[in-house]
Image: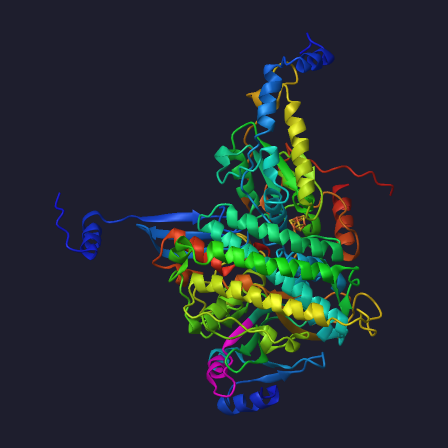
Amino acid sequence: MDTSFSSQKEIDARERGGLGTERLEVAFGPHHPSTHGVFRMDVVLEGEKIVSLKPVFGYLHRNHEKIGESVSYLGIIPYTDRLDYLCSPTSNWGFVLACEKLAGLEAPERAQYIRVILAELTRLVNHTCLAGFLAQDLGAMGTPLMYAFRERENILDLFESLTGARMMVNYFRFGGCRCDLPEGWLQGVSRVLDAYSKFLDEFEALLTGNEILLQRTQGVGVLKADLAINAGITGPCLRASGVNYDLRKVDAYGIYSRFPFRVPIGEHGDCFDRYMVRILEMRESIGILRQAVREIPAGPIMDAKAKTRSIRPKAGEVYGRIESPKGELGFYLIADGSPSPYRYRIRPPSFINLTVLEEMCLGLTVADAVAILGSIDIVLGEVDR
Amino acid sequence: METPENILARLQAAFPSAKIELLPNGCPSQPPSLLLDPAFACEIATFLKNDAALRLDHATNVTGVDWPKEGYIEAVYHLFSMEKKHGPLIIRLRTANRDTAVVLPSLTPVWRSADLQEREIFDLFGIKFEGHPDLRRILMWDGFKDHPMRKDYVAPDDFEYEPTAHDDVLERAQQHFSKNA
Amino acid sequence: MSVLSDSLIEDLKKQGVLVTSIEALYNWGRSNSVWPLQFGLACCAIEMIAASMARFDLSRFGSEVFRPSPRQADLMIVSGTVTKKMAPQVVRLFNQMPDPKYVIAMGACAISGGPFKQGYNVLKGVDRFIPVDIYIPGCPPRPEALLHGLMELQKKIRAQKLTGENRAKYFDAAQPGEYPIPSFGEHDLEPSKNAALWSPAQVARKD
Ligand code: SF4
């Protein structure tokens, strides 16, 4: 055998000419531990390189939109919990926001603060879990995810003592919130926050500087800003590519204009930036939460105009959007004067963030595709709805 | 952002032969939408995206709406601008009818974000997007024949007994039991 | 175990003599190392993960070894909504698991379709295609509920007989270990249920 290769390039060329690689099709999912549920990718490999990747959706298509057309506006709120089941308060908020625009309601001060507190707690839960899952996908089986879920439990305890449910809070109402904070709840939030900053330091010491994590994520799955904008990518994925677009700043919905937080921006648009943007966002969220806990006023939690629990808006249409932890979560509603919407459409951030998955993965290996998918942060309930 | 009325006037000046209409919105706080001529949709979309004052580079929400009484299916696009941080401008396209002429031009070449969402509309509403790079079913399986988000779709009758019974669900349950009695 | 009475066994145990039967020993071993399939479908899967994490610690019951491959798993926790598009895959995974195998239907969706029962793409209960041993109601069931379900399953395993008339089904070669996989039809799954396995509950109606 001739072993006098002069360069890697030559080896590659000879291999291609001499042996030729057969294309290998890999059906990745829907049952695969690192597809975060029942997502599927049809991958074509040449050697180890991905030459084509087609996402296949629909394994969790639960017909949210069709069902939404037959239940009342109020009845949709529990369904929104189950959209992005890691962060139900923000899904609630998106829907309630759209309906409030439609019905001309506005939540009073106290309710606004409660909403911000819940939404930012959700962001903490989501981003922590994401970091844990990402580490899991990179091969750190167990430890980081254990830490993430340990912290998540503390926040879920808060949710539970407020709303009665750990995951599916079903808490926001048109023009306010369902019930007032129980006694001592805000102190509980402060306690969790104190512990959380420490936890984040610990978590970062474990992960951020880690050689393996750096090697597996830096320069992997680069997404350029112009492609990201054109493809409708939103949320941390977009900001990791260097675009400053955070709906909490742009739309300043609710009372976000009162919080002087910074929007972390990435530079390279690779997996590491996507990871890092989220870590930094969590630190900002802690700041927002501290301020909200400090400033929250006493008062009613429901708009006095909201006479009934459900609404029955006049014909018209509305698009309401919020910055969910995964990106722009929008709700498009067409009302026709009946108790349920004529058309109920969810603009799912994690679904649209997958638009350019193929471009991000081309030329890389399957292991990189796993890291990329992990860093995009999808949740299947929202992808397939 | 400019008012939709203003944009309409500018579009009419730029595309004199295109039929563009302003559709009012019943909800007072929300903007009206522009109904575009499908024949010019791609050019108008490119115009909206590149116009220096508008720069609507972010097509967020693309969806279909079925109007059986009026006899057409609509595709609705919500446009925002990430650069100028304004929006939304809502544009709509309408098919000629609901069964034979359900073709609309695809705006995916202009906004990639419409890619998966137009596929979803094709799957659930049955609008065929001309010029879409990869128009296949996305949520349902390939051999599926119906378009379930249409208002006249009838789901397969596979309830075993009465589900939460009210309104049309109750009706369905009653039909089921009278059939299987 | 009919030769020795239970109280005698207890007494012997106190003296440091352990008397047991092969059956009890075998089932004890199996029930304490139920390896679930790492298989999450929807929201309930998050609670399943939570159950295996720090606070709830599924490993106390010997079940923390989530197996990504069905070939190595004993237990399928159907945690979440089974859609019609997913149903053939679920059945296929179940078929690939070696006997003895068990199924836990976790959550309202897996039991009956739950909140999404009226969906056109939602399978109204996973028991239409595969046999279910334990049903855990809830939306989502709390991790404690999953632990309880697992303990119930352990009880069930411990009660399985190795010999005799009512020995466990999986010893019977005539019993199906695999179930037919539905195919995608033009409007629905074909068939839409496994008639040999499941028939609708009968509701007594007055009118
Ligand atoms: S039972 Fe509830 S929590 Fe579980 S998968 Fe179904 S909707 Fe989600």
Is residue B13 left or right of A109 when viewed as pictured? left
Q: As displayed, is residue B7 above or below residue A356? A: below
The picture places residue A265, in percent across and down from the top left corner, at 48, 71
The picture places residue A385, in percent across and down from the top left corner, at 60, 58
Residue C131: image quadrant is: top right
Q: As displayed, is residue B115 above or below residue A32? A: below
The picture places residue B110, in percent across and down from the top left corner, at 46, 75
The picture places residue C1, in percent across and down from the top left corner, at 66, 11
In magenta segment, residue A84 = no
Stretch of the chain drawn in magenta: B44-60
- Residue depicted at x 70% and y 51%: C115
Give C52 or C12, whichever is nearer the viewer: C12
Q: Residue furthest right?
A: C206
Is residue B59 left or right of B170 when viewed as pictured? left
Residue A9: image quadrant is: bottom left
Check the picture and name the quadrant holding the N terminus of chain A: top left
- Residue depicted at x 67% and y 46%: C109
Is residue B116 left or right of C140 when viewed as pictured? left
In magenta segment, residue B54 = yes
